[in-house]
Amino acid sequence: MAWQIDLRGKSGIVTGSASGIGKAAAIHLAAMGARLALVDIGAEGLEAAAREIRSAGGSSALCLQADAADENQVERSVARCLAEFGAIDFLVNGHGILRRTPFLEIQNSEWDLMIGVNLRGCYLFCKAVLPHLKARGRGAIVNVASLAGRSCSILGGAHYTTAKHGLIGLSRHLAREFAPHGIRVNAFCPGATLTPMIVNSTPPEEIERVAAGIPRGRWAAPEEQAYVIGFLLSDAAANITGACIDSNGGTLMI
């Protein structure tokens, strides 16, 4: 049996789609035929992503400005997606923030922010989307975690590492609980990826140092990570659920 990587006729939500892996995933999924609701806290970046989708031949995307850590905004985003498309087939939790603060310097407010966006935000979107997937008896969720969730972050602080470990645990639990309802949930764990968030916060010499420690000798491009997300959402991954899928250039081999 040959499976096609084809999302025509399917609709879904991609969070964090104004930049980085989320944006690359949105462009790739649209090219595969999916109808998308793009969600991000930054409206300008959303419109730019939507223009790129259109210029690449994808269908028009619904742009929804929302804070993933705000339950009311999350619920409104999901409701808008349903009103626009009539159904939701998949969710990509691709949003995230990074702080480099040493542990003893982390303020409680910064800890809460990091956990709120990187973990609670994913929980809120899963909680809002899963009833609709369950009612349809099918669907897929990809939670973009990190290599930090498999080990520890070399660029972010302890709060970043903690949130990503938690996201992997959430993904595994949801995979087990909702598998009987035809729903697949996987954690995607990209390694060093040269996103705007990294470029804007990391000195060039540190970027070179990290690359030197990767067996393949380079950072990944966001587009490379997007292909993995597309695969996990497709029928080609029909038997994959509860997995942590690594894409790190050989940095972690277990």
Image (spheres, rainbow, N blue to C red):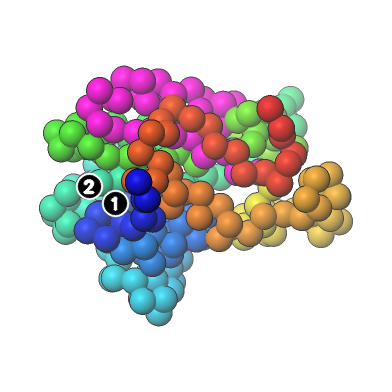
Residue 85 in the figure: left or right of residue 210: left
Instruction: Say which residue label 2 marks.
Output: 88
Q: Quadrant of residue 5?
A: bottom left
Label 2 crowding class (10 Å Cα cut-off): few <14, some 14-19, many 20+? many
Image: 177 above or below 66: above
Residue 31 in the figure: left or right of residue 152: left
Image: 45 above or below 133: below
Q: Is residue 8 or residue 36 the one in the foreground?
A: 8
Instruction: Measuring from the top left, give residue 86's x and y in whole percent.
Output: 13, 53
CA distance separating discs 1 and 2: 5 Å
Q: Which residues are magenta?
A: 162-191
- Residue drawn at the location 29% of the way across and 33% of the way down: 183
Instruction: Measuring from the top left, give residue 228's x and y in whole percent.
Output: 51, 49
- Residue drawn at the location 74% of the way across and 25% of the way down: 104
Mark 1 element type: strand
Instruction: Say which residue label 1 marks.
Output: 12
Q: Is residue 80 or residue 22 the one in the foreground?
A: 22
Image: 196 above or below 125: below
**Magenta stretch secondary structure, dominant:** helix
Residue lying furthest front in this view?
1
Q: Quadrant of the C terminus?
A: top right
Residue lying furthest bottom in this view?
55
Q: Earlier in the sequence, mark 1 or mark 2?
A: 1
- Residue drawn at the location 38% of the way across and 67% of the way down: 31
Confirm or deny contact between disc 1 and disc 2 (CB under 8 A).
yes
Residue 102 in the figure: left or right of residue 187: right
